[in-house]
Image: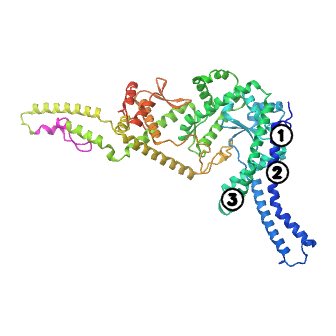
Amino acid sequence: MADPETGVGALAARSRALAVLRIRSTALGAAVLPAAVAVVLLVGGATGRLGSPDAAAGSGWGIARLAVSGVALLVLLLAVLVGAVISGARPALSPSVPVAEPAAPDLYRLVRDLADTLDVPAPSAIALTPDCDSWLEDRTHRAHGPPRPAPRRAQAAPVLVIGSPFLWWMRVGELRALLAPVVAGTGPSAHPDIAAARRFIRGLDAAVAVSARAKGLRAPALRFVGRAARLMLRACREHATIMERGVAAAASERAQAVDRGLRTVAQEQVGLAYAGWDRLLTRVALPAWRLGRWPSCLDVGVVSALTELSRRDRLAEGFTARLGERPACDLLEEPGAVDSAASLLAARLFHGGPAGPDWSPVAWSQYPEEVVDRTWRLEAARLHRVLDDLPAGADGAQGERTRADRGALAGAGGLPASLPGEAARPAAAAPAVGPAGSGSTAVGASGRAGAVTRAGATATAARRPAAGPTLARVIDRLARDDRAGDLVAARLGEELEREEHEEAARQAGRGPAPEEALPDVSWGDGLADGGLPLFPLQPPRTDRELLAEHVTAMVCCAAVDTAGAAPGLDWLDGPALLVDGARRADFGSPVRSLVEEGDAEPLRDWLTALGVRPEKPVRLV
């Protein structure tokens, strides 16, 4: 095996690291240059070589000494300020779940054995992150933890951060092959020049972050520090980029001889894991997070999602045969506890907000009832609130049809012409104009009138949508005219935006949750200011998309309440409607026809075929 100090990548990384250190030395030299000039002037004046020592302060040399000394003092003060901020600023820390050695002795043993095989220093610790990536992270800065009595060099090795989906999806051999080039990076990282250059760049980056958050009286001074740090970062950018490429090339070159055959398989699994993890977060976890529930076993869920993806995708055929081998999560003593901590961290990273009292875990067995059904009914309730708040004139056409129906029946003697809010005349008062001896005739007329009344009421009820939260009301409203969909969609967007603002204000008023309550999670820098997610999962939806989602939720509620359907979970598509145990997803096109074109016939045909009764009220939350 080639010496890491003589490899092409390592030599390139070291040369670029020296270039970064030269920039640091240049900045330091520029800071002390005025002080050096001032010292020369003062010493020259004291020895009589630059003016007479007894010369007046108003002379040329005296003025020069005073001016240069003042400038030197100011520059030194600014240099001390910049240096203090750069050295004391806390470098960015990736959010992760620390894994102590007693909690994963087999995993630590695997990593140390890999480091010995590669002839590089072993990582100082292992942490997991809810992402499909792995890297080395330097956490030796004093701001990353309490002071330790051990020497600094004893903690110089970086921390190995592993993507948690890899542990549950990959087999032990695949994980070892995947981590080989990552662990090999500890060799170049241990070089003093590369380590010093990285510390300097991380300090500059942290100083820029400190200046961006500066407020109050310290803001002007910290803004100056930020400008100086940005200037040095621009000078170091190219050298730092090439240095990191050289480190990666050196690590890859060293790891080529380790598990060569499994590395190709492991790289294929990385792409598959990323696809399944993304679908699981956006389609399955996000609806639960919006309700304040976080799935407590996301990494277990990714195995089901990837298995389903392997079954559907012809390119992934054969991958499920690996599931008979030992999974890498067996290297953990308590995989359930680690999975729960990583799942909670994922909720904070990708959805935002602290883990407060409103957050509660949900198991996959409870997901259909606790998340899917509740989401549908919340969206159905929101849709009907919007319909209730529409202007009175919006339902004018329906009101005219209702009054016309009532007038026709009243003319036939079957139904009073009054509206529902008016008092109806009693049926017994109708035959009062007849003679006293014609009681049987009056009774017969009353009976016939009652029969006509019941028949007319039944016909009117069949033509008029039932009151309350019914699917028929939604369909009739959207199919009535072309403007109905635009109006309802706009109102839905406004309603959802208002709810989001109220939730954000409530979160801000409650304040962040104390990190001490969750000791198993290293939050790092996972949240931006204001509790917003660092990595939002979903772009803003259009009003039409919101309307389609809410109509879909109403259709599902009606199917569950009137046709015996049930809420379910699809590992790749999220909430699903189950009919006789099978997923039904063929109502998407009829819903889009109703929402976008106002055509309700395809949806009515689908409801009739399934046995859904749209005129029946549905249960809302």
Amino acid carrying mark 3 in the image = Arg
Q: Nearer the viewer, mark 3 or mark 1?
A: 1
- Residue 154 magenta: no
Give how far apart the Cα atoms at labels 2 and 3 are: 24 Å
Specify the segment rendered in magenta: 409-432
Q: Closer to the camera, 493 or 39?
A: 39
Work out whether mark 1 precedes mark 2 in sequence or the reverse, and give the earlier one: 1
Q: Earlier in the sequence, mark 3 or mark 1?
A: 1
**Residue 412 lies in the magenta stretch:** yes
Q: Is residue 608 left or right of residue 315?
A: left
Residue pictured at 80% horizontal, 53% vertical: 24
The percent coordinates of residue 29 (x first, y second) are 83, 58
| Image quadrant where residue 419 sits | top left
Disc number at residue 555?
none
Q: Residue at x 85, y 65 (%)?
A: 37
For badge 1, the amino acid type reads Leu
Q: Position of residue 568 (x, y in %)?
A: 51, 29
Q: Label 1 to label 2, Cα distance in Å?
A: 17 Å
User: Which residue is the site of mark 3?
Assistant: 223
Question: In the rendering, at what x and y percent does residue 311 appear?
Answer: 59, 23
Determine the main secondary structure of the stretch shown in magenta.
Answer: loop
Residue 146 visible? The answer is no
Describe the element under mark 3 as helix, strand or loop: helix
Give the crowd class for mark 2: few <14, some 14-19, many >=20 residues within 10 Å: some
Q: Secondary structure at mark 2?
A: helix
Three-letter code, disc 2: Arg
Reading the image, the residue beneath label 1 is 11
* Residue ID for mark 2: 22
Crowding at label 1, few (<14), some or many (≥20) Cα neighbours within 10 Å?
some
Q: Crowding at label 3, few (<14), some or many (≥20) Cα neighbours within 10 Å?
A: some
